[in-house]
């Protein structure tokens, strides 16, 4: 099987020749890369780096409504209806031109994707993430109550934009999955109630996930923290899977697999053991091995590899990773 066939097989619950070795967040931290280069790693681009480590070529192509930069971390670019109306009018953030530029990028990957050489995930902003980007972190949480009509308008506009993206994308390529950025959970669970999720999030996902499924493409939700409680919510809105399943937040992939046997899981490998030596690296793969054997699971680091991990640590990790990807299908 080639790269794309192996990955697709797992998404469909089938057994490949070996599990694909994926680094889903393959834009390593700058501090991590600086350390590795200082310790002898050649200076390589993304494709070359993935090949160097023996990892699958997974590429992320993003298309989101562009917004002006906020004045600081966690701050927004709007406060009310008037600000949003001016933002839309003056910046043309939902323009077809943004989608056309995205399609040009997709075209650059098409031949390699058609040949099965690469895996493509598409990044779209989700209905929790995007309003937060507009309002800022704290005002966004109040906006569910203070500006309910505006929240609904933003979500409607984003749904329309995302649907236009999908329609143009599927004319050119059927990627392995559409990944929606959300980050709506933290180490104690969801950042919003199920009531608010069903009011503001679910109705806007359902048309998109239905259309995506009709085109034979999977939908996965990217949300950090402990997503365990939210999985039933995600299934209700049509999602096929979730990532990155952060172990530090207490996520138990074995428990999720037992409760949801065909829900796709991506990630789950505890990044905090990667600098502790081969025995710790191997023990973490042993923890995950039953889930790796269960199907519908792509093992990967549960977020970006931290700078505590040396170049030698990562090479050990990749070597053991390959061993367990083969062991999982035997």
Image (spheres, rainbow, N blue to C red):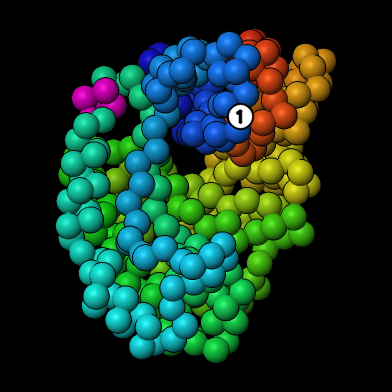
Q: Is residue 100 above or below residue 49?
A: below
Q: Residue at x 24, y 75 (%)?
A: 90
Main secondary structure found in the magenta portion: helix
Q: Is residue 4 above or below residue 255?
A: above
Q: Residue at x 26, y 66 (%)?
A: 94
Q: Is residue 300 left or right of residue 65?
A: right
Q: Is residue 315 left or right of residue 2?
A: right
**Residue 321 belongs to the span the image colors magenta:** no
Magenta span: 110-114
Residue 19 in picture, x, y percent from top left: 54, 20
Q: Nearer the viewer, residue 206 or 34?
A: 34
Q: Which residue is mark 1?
A: 32
Q: Quadrant of residue 192?
A: bottom right
Q: Is residue 135 above or below residue 245?
A: below
Assign the N terminus to one quadrant of the image: top left
Residue 217 in picture, x, y percent from top left: 36, 42
Residue 305 in picture, x, y percent from top left: 63, 32
Disc 1 on helix, strand or loop? Answer: helix
Q: Nearer the viewer, residue 293 or 183?
A: 183
Q: Is residue 87 left or right of residue 313?
A: left
- For mark 1, does the 10 Å Cα neighbourhood hold few (<14), some (14 to 19), or many (20 or more) residues? some
Answer whether residue 324 is visible to the viewer in this image. Answer: no
Q: Nearer the viewer, residue 159 or 42?
A: 42
Q: Quadrant of residue 231?
A: bottom right
Q: Quadrant of residue 321?
A: top right
Assign the C terminus to one quadrant of the image: top right
Answer whether residue 184 is visible to the viewer in this image. Answer: yes
Q: Residue at x 28, y 66 (%)?
A: 93
């Amino acid at each position: 099987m080639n790269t794309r066939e192996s990955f697709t097989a797992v998404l469909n619950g089938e057994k490949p020749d070996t599990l694909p070795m994926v680094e889903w967040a393959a834009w390593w931290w700058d501090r991590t890369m600086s350390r590795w280069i200082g310790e002898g790693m050649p200076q390589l681009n993304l494709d070359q780096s993935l090949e160097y480590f023996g990892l699958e070529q997974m590429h992320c192509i993003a298309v989101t409504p562009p917004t002006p930069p906020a004045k600081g971390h966690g701050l927004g670019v709007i406060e009310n209806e008037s600000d949003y109306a001016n933002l839309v009018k003056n910046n043309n953030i939902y323009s077809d031109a943004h989608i056309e530029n995205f399609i040009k990028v997709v075209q650059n990957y098409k031949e390699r994707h058609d040949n099965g050489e690469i895996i493509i995930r598409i990044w779209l902003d989700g209905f929790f993430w995007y309003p937060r980007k507009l309002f800022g972190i704290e005002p966004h949480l109040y906006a569910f109550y203070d500006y309910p009509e505006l929240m609904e308008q933003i979500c409607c506009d984003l749904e329309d934009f995302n649907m236009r993206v999908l329609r143009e994308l599927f004319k050119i390529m059927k990627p392995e999955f559409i990944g929606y950025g959300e980050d709506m959970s933290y180490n104690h669970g969801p950042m919003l109630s199920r009531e608010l999720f069903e009011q503001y999030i679910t109705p806007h996902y359902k048309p998109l996930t239905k259309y995506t499924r009709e085109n034979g493409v999977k939908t996965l939700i990217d949300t950090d923290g402990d997503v365990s409680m939210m999985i039933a919510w995600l299934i209700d809105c049509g999602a096929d899977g979730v990532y990155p399943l952060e172990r530090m937040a207490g996520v138990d992939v074995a428990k999720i697999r037992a409760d949801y046997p065909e829900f796709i899981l991506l990630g789950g490998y505890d990044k905090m053991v990667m600098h502790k030596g081969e025995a710790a690296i191997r023990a973490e793969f042993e923890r995950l091995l039953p889930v790796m054997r269960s199907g519908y699971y792509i093992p990967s680091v549960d977020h970006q590899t931290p700078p505590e991990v040396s170049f030698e640590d990562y090479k050990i990790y990749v070597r053991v990773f390959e061993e367990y990807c083969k062991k999982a299908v035997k």
